[in-house]
Image (cartoon, helix red, strand yellow):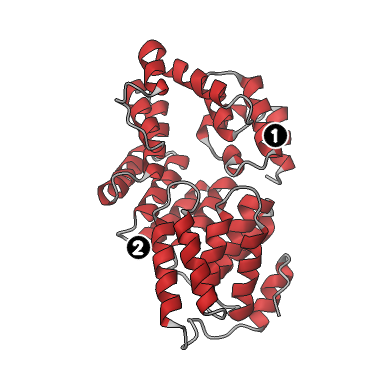
């Protein structure tokens, strides 16, 4: 029977039925191998989960329906697909029904509540429960750090990602996550160093390039801003056929942001709001953010924490937007 997840009652029920942490002794070896393959692909994703990762996770739970980690992998695959995915929540509840003390499952539950339901109370409870049960789980620490940054606690966020790096010193995701949290905390030189560690391990890791782009923009380095922004999108800043390169050569960064804003003009995305903010167009930025909220854009939860939107804090329309998301 599946657990009914809902607020603090989920925590109480899980503690009452908790078992000693660890996977059940009998797991189908082929199911475990499929899970590991899926997790390896998923961990190297750049945006949404790679379809091949989903195929491996589905194979894992097909081979062994009682393999809780397999359901966690499937939940993590679905949770990154965009708008709220019921398949993600169903997989989380299945994992916790099998193993209520599985820290990895609590991390997935917390991340889902954070990015899809904007249920900040439950998200915080679940992510802290994950760290309590599985203190060395990289994504439990990473997602708790992101939750803390989004909810206005950047220094605490840094501490969580530092713990993730200690537990996984070879993980580019952990280093890139720490890089981002250091940036949100205003520690720019430390952030650059951490991003470089991530890129040394995995040169095309886009999250690291994204943070380096933000730092270069704040420092007023136009060429580096454009280079890192292009690489964050997986593109070459020297490709003459790329329209963004043409825009930059003709009109600098403002031409690039204008190009992006026009490209996104009908979709109402967070990306468009970001470009408009860099152009200094406050009212248009607010409209784009409101549209992104209404579309449940995956990135909209970062609006409160992103330094690019810091000048909007105190703006009544922006504050109303954040309140509408529970922030």
Name the quadrant containing residue 33.
Answer: bottom left
Q: Mark 1 packing: few (<14 Cα in 10 Å), some, or many (20+)?
A: some
In the rendered image, residue 8, in percent from the top left (x then y), is placed at 71, 68
Quarter holding the C terminus? top right
Q: In this view, does 107 lie to the left or right of 195?
A: right
Can you identify the residue that label 2 sits on?
Answer: 168
Can you identify the residue that label 1 sits on?
Answer: 319
C-alpha gap between disc 2 and disc 1:
37 Å
Name the quadrant containing residue 124.
Answer: bottom right
Q: Mark 2 packing: few (<14 Cα in 10 Å), some, or many (20+)?
A: some
Disc 2 or disc 1, which is closer to the eye? Answer: 2
Q: Which of 164 and 34 is in front in this view?
A: 34
Identify whether 261 is placed above or below 118: above
In the rendered image, residue 35, in percent from the top left (x then y), is placed at 44, 70
In the rendered image, residue 252, in percent from the top left (x then y), is placed at 39, 15
- Whether label 2 touches label 1, CB < 8 Å: no
Question: What element does badge 2 sit on?
Answer: loop
In the rendered image, residue 30, in percent from the top left (x then y), is placed at 42, 78
Q: Kindly identify the residue that appears in the image at 62 percent across and 53 percent down.
A: 114
Q: Which of 169 and 89 is in front in this view?
A: 89
Q: Kindly identify the residue that appears in the image at 56 percent across and 52 percent down.
A: 147
Quarter holding the N terminus? bottom right
Q: In this view, does 12 lie to the left or right of 240?
A: right
Question: What element does badge 1 sit on?
Answer: helix
Q: In this view, does 183 lie to the left or right of 132?
A: left
Q: Is residue 240 left or right of residue 120?
A: left
Name the quadrant containing residue 322.
Answer: top right
Identify whether 94 is placed above or below 143: below
């Amino acid at each position: 029977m599946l657990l009914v997840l809902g607020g603090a009652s989920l925590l109480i029920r899980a503690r009452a039925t908790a078992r000693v942490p660890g996977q059940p002794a009998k797991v189908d070896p082929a199911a475990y191998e499929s899970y590991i393959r899926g997790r390896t692909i998923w961990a190297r994703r750049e945006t949404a989960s790679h379809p091949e990762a989903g195929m491996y996770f589905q194979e894992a739970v097909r081979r062994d329906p009682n393999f809780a980690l397999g359901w966690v992998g499937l939940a993590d695959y679905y949770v990154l697909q965009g708008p709220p995915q019921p398949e993600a929540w169903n997989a989380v509840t299945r994992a916790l029904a099998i193993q209520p003390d599985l820290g990895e499952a609590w991390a997935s539950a917390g991340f889902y509540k954070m990015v899809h339901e904007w249920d900040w109370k439950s998200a915080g409870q679940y992510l802290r429960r994950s760290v309590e049960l599985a203190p060395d789980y990289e994504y439990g620490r990473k997602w708790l750090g992101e939750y803390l940054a989004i909810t206005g606690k950047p220094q605490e966020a840094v501490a969580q990602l530092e713990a993730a790096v200690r537990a996984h010193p070879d993980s580019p995701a952990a280093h890139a996550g720490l890089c981002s949290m250091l940036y949100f905390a205003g520690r720019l030189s430390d952030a650059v160093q951490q991003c470089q560690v991530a890129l040394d391990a995995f040169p095309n890791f886009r999250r690291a390039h994204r943070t380096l782009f933000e730092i270069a923009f704040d420092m007023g380095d136009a060429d580096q801003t454009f280079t890192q922004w292009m690489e964050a999108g997986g593109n070459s800043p020297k490709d003459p056929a790329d329209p963004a390169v043409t825009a930059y050569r003709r009109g600098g960064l403002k031409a690039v942001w204008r190009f992006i804003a026009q490209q996104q003009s009908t979709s109402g995305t967070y990306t468009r709001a970001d470009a408009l903010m860099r152009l200094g167009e406050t009212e248009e930025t607010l409209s784009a953010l409101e549209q992104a909220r209404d579309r449940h854009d995956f990135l909209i939860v970062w609006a409160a924490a992103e330094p690019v939107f810091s000048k909007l804090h105190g703006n009544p329309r922006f504050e109303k937007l954040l309140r509408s998301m529970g922030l």
